[in-house]
Amino acid sequence: MIDTERLHLRPLTVDDADRIVELTSEPEVGRYLPALDPEQLRARVGHLAAQWAEHGYGVFAVELRQTGELVGRVGLIDWPQFDEVEVGWTLRRDAWGHGYATEAARACVDFGFATCGKPYLTCNIHPDNAPSFRVAERLGFRRFREDTLLGMPVVVNRLDRPTAA
Protein backbone atom coordinates (compact mmCIF):
# COMPACT_ATOMS: atom_id res chain seq x y z
CA MET A 1 0.00 0.00 0.00
CA ILE A 2 1.06 3.56 -0.66
CA ASP A 3 -0.18 6.71 1.00
CA THR A 4 0.31 10.07 -0.66
CA GLU A 5 -0.73 13.44 0.72
CA ARG A 6 -4.40 12.94 -0.23
CA LEU A 7 -4.67 9.38 -1.54
CA HIS A 8 -4.47 5.80 -0.34
CA LEU A 9 -3.35 3.27 -2.96
CA ARG A 10 -4.02 -0.40 -2.28
CA PRO A 11 -3.75 -3.41 -4.56
CA LEU A 12 -6.77 -3.78 -6.83
CA THR A 13 -8.75 -6.97 -6.15
CA VAL A 14 -11.55 -8.81 -7.91
CA ASP A 15 -13.87 -7.34 -5.25
CA ASP A 16 -13.32 -3.95 -6.94
CA ALA A 17 -14.59 -5.16 -10.32
CA ASP A 18 -18.14 -3.81 -10.05
CA ARG A 19 -16.90 -0.37 -9.01
CA ILE A 20 -14.39 -0.33 -11.88
CA VAL A 21 -17.18 -1.33 -14.32
CA GLU A 22 -19.30 1.53 -12.96
CA LEU A 23 -16.41 3.99 -13.21
CA THR A 24 -15.53 3.12 -16.81
CA SER A 25 -19.18 3.21 -17.89
CA GLU A 26 -19.11 7.00 -17.47
CA PRO A 27 -19.02 8.21 -21.11
CA GLU A 28 -16.19 10.71 -20.64
CA VAL A 29 -14.11 8.17 -18.71
CA GLY A 30 -14.64 5.24 -21.08
CA ARG A 31 -14.14 7.24 -24.26
CA TYR A 32 -10.43 6.37 -24.55
CA LEU A 33 -10.56 2.85 -23.11
CA PRO A 34 -10.99 -0.41 -25.01
CA ALA A 35 -14.63 -1.27 -25.62
CA LEU A 36 -15.23 -4.08 -23.14
CA ASP A 37 -18.62 -5.28 -21.96
CA PRO A 38 -19.06 -5.57 -18.16
CA GLU A 39 -18.12 -9.26 -18.08
CA GLN A 40 -14.98 -8.68 -20.15
CA LEU A 41 -14.05 -5.78 -17.89
CA ARG A 42 -14.57 -7.89 -14.75
CA ALA A 43 -12.25 -10.52 -16.27
CA ARG A 44 -9.71 -7.77 -17.06
CA VAL A 45 -9.82 -6.58 -13.43
CA GLY A 46 -9.15 -10.19 -12.37
CA HIS A 47 -6.16 -10.32 -14.72
CA LEU A 48 -4.82 -7.02 -13.39
CA ALA A 49 -5.29 -8.16 -9.78
CA ALA A 50 -3.41 -11.42 -10.55
CA GLN A 51 -0.34 -9.48 -11.71
CA TRP A 52 0.46 -8.73 -8.05
CA ALA A 53 1.14 -12.40 -7.32
CA GLU A 54 2.92 -12.95 -10.63
CA HIS A 55 5.18 -9.88 -10.68
CA GLY A 56 5.12 -8.29 -7.23
CA TYR A 57 3.55 -5.16 -8.70
CA GLY A 58 0.24 -4.32 -10.31
CA VAL A 59 -2.70 -1.95 -10.34
CA PHE A 60 -3.88 -0.05 -7.28
CA ALA A 61 -7.35 1.06 -6.31
CA VAL A 62 -7.20 4.81 -5.63
CA GLU A 63 -9.09 5.94 -2.55
CA LEU A 64 -9.40 9.35 -0.96
CA ARG A 65 -7.57 9.24 2.38
CA GLN A 66 -10.17 11.41 4.11
CA THR A 67 -13.21 9.32 3.15
CA GLY A 68 -11.96 5.97 1.82
CA GLU A 69 -14.03 6.57 -1.33
CA LEU A 70 -12.75 4.79 -4.46
CA VAL A 71 -12.09 7.36 -7.18
CA GLY A 72 -10.21 5.24 -9.71
CA ARG A 73 -7.34 2.95 -10.47
CA VAL A 74 -3.68 3.56 -11.16
CA GLY A 75 -0.73 1.26 -11.38
CA LEU A 76 1.74 -0.87 -13.20
CA ILE A 77 0.60 -3.10 -16.04
CA ASP A 78 2.91 -5.70 -17.54
CA TRP A 79 2.74 -5.93 -21.35
CA PRO A 80 4.80 -9.02 -22.28
CA GLN A 81 4.28 -8.46 -26.03
CA PHE A 82 6.33 -5.25 -25.70
CA ASP A 83 8.52 -6.36 -22.76
CA GLU A 84 7.39 -3.13 -21.08
CA VAL A 85 5.64 -2.03 -17.92
CA GLU A 86 3.06 0.72 -18.25
CA VAL A 87 1.97 3.25 -15.65
CA GLY A 88 -1.76 3.63 -16.29
CA TRP A 89 -4.50 5.67 -14.65
CA THR A 90 -8.27 5.96 -14.88
CA LEU A 91 -10.29 8.16 -12.54
CA ARG A 92 -13.96 8.92 -12.13
CA ARG A 93 -15.07 12.04 -13.97
CA ASP A 94 -15.82 13.94 -10.76
CA ALA A 95 -12.23 13.27 -9.61
CA TRP A 96 -10.71 15.04 -12.62
CA GLY A 97 -9.07 18.42 -12.20
CA HIS A 98 -7.88 17.88 -8.61
CA GLY A 99 -4.38 16.58 -9.41
CA TYR A 100 -5.22 13.06 -8.20
CA ALA A 101 -4.03 11.35 -11.40
CA THR A 102 -0.65 13.07 -11.23
CA GLU A 103 -0.30 12.43 -7.48
CA ALA A 104 -1.19 8.73 -7.79
CA ALA A 105 0.82 8.15 -10.96
CA ARG A 106 3.91 9.84 -9.47
CA ALA A 107 3.73 7.40 -6.55
CA CYS A 108 3.40 4.51 -9.04
CA VAL A 109 6.41 5.69 -11.03
CA ASP A 110 8.51 5.68 -7.87
CA PHE A 111 7.12 2.28 -6.87
CA GLY A 112 7.67 0.94 -10.40
CA PHE A 113 11.31 1.90 -10.59
CA ALA A 114 11.84 0.41 -7.12
CA THR A 115 10.16 -2.92 -7.94
CA CYS A 116 10.03 -3.86 -11.62
CA GLY A 117 13.68 -3.63 -12.68
CA LYS A 118 12.94 -2.12 -16.09
CA PRO A 119 15.21 0.60 -17.55
CA TYR A 120 12.14 2.68 -18.41
CA LEU A 121 8.38 2.82 -17.84
CA THR A 122 5.74 3.65 -20.42
CA CYS A 123 2.27 5.12 -20.48
CA ASN A 124 -0.01 4.30 -23.39
CA ILE A 125 -2.38 7.11 -24.28
CA HIS A 126 -5.08 7.34 -26.95
CA PRO A 127 -3.99 10.04 -29.45
CA ASP A 128 -7.03 12.24 -28.62
CA ASN A 129 -6.72 12.07 -24.81
CA ALA A 130 -5.23 15.51 -24.11
CA PRO A 131 -5.76 15.39 -20.30
CA SER A 132 -3.72 12.18 -20.00
CA PHE A 133 -0.95 13.67 -22.14
CA ARG A 134 -0.78 16.58 -19.67
CA VAL A 135 -0.45 14.17 -16.73
CA ALA A 136 2.28 12.24 -18.56
CA GLU A 137 4.18 15.46 -19.33
CA ARG A 138 4.00 16.58 -15.68
CA LEU A 139 5.56 13.24 -14.73
CA GLY A 140 8.37 13.63 -17.27
CA PHE A 141 7.19 11.09 -19.88
CA ARG A 142 8.09 11.85 -23.51
CA ARG A 143 6.63 10.57 -26.76
CA PHE A 144 8.33 7.30 -27.77
CA ARG A 145 6.33 5.60 -30.55
CA GLU A 146 2.86 4.93 -31.92
CA ASP A 147 1.37 1.47 -31.50
CA THR A 148 -1.85 -0.50 -31.11
CA LEU A 149 -2.96 -1.94 -27.78
CA LEU A 150 -6.12 -3.98 -27.20
CA GLY A 151 -7.30 -2.95 -30.65
CA MET A 152 -6.89 0.79 -30.05
CA PRO A 153 -4.30 3.24 -31.35
CA VAL A 154 -1.99 4.54 -28.62
CA VAL A 155 0.92 6.90 -28.32
CA VAL A 156 3.51 5.18 -26.15
CA ASN A 157 5.30 7.61 -23.88
CA ARG A 158 8.50 6.73 -22.07
CA LEU A 159 10.19 7.73 -18.83
CA ASP A 160 13.75 6.48 -18.29
CA ARG A 161 14.90 5.23 -14.91
CA PRO A 162 16.65 8.09 -13.10
CA THR A 163 20.41 7.77 -13.02
CA ALA A 164 22.26 7.90 -9.71
CA ALA A 165 23.73 11.32 -9.01
Image: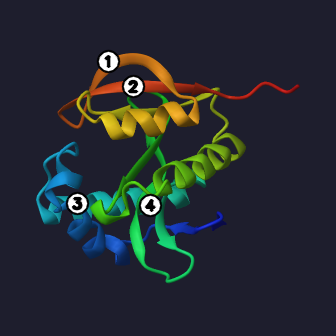
Kindly identify the amino acid type of the residue bearing the numbered disc 1. Answer: Glu
Which is closer to the viewer, label 4 or label 1? Answer: 1
Instruction: Check if mark 4's residue and mark 1's residue have beta carbons within 8 Å.
Output: no
Q: Residues within 10 Å of mark 1 (few under 14, many from 20)?
A: some
Residue located at (45% from left, 26% from top):
157
Q: CA distance from mark 2 to mark 1?
A: 6 Å
| Residue 154 image-quadrant placement | top left
Residue located at (50% from left, 30% from top):
137
- Looking at the image, is mark 1 or mark 3 earlier in the sequence? 3
Quickly name the residue at label 3.
24
**Secondary-structure class at tag 4:** helix
| Residue 41 image-quadrant placement | bottom left
Left or right of 35? Residue 41 is right
Quickly name the residue at label 1.
146
**Secondary-structure class at tag 3:** helix
Kindly identify the amino acid type of the residue bearing the numbered disc 3. Answer: Thr
- Looking at the image, is mark 3 or mark 2 earlier in the sequence? 3
Location of residue 50 with respect to 15 vertically, above or below: above
Left or right of 2? Residue 97 is left
Location of residue 130 with respect to 142 vertically, above or below: below
Res 145 visible: yes
Kindly identify the amino acid type of the residue bearing the numbered disc 2. Answer: Val
Q: Nearer the viewer, residue 76 or 74?
A: 74
Q: CA distance from mark 3 to mark 2?
A: 21 Å
Left or right of 71? Residue 56 is right
Quickly name the residue at label 4.
50
Colour option used: rainbow
Q: Position of residue 4 (x, y in %)?
A: 64, 63
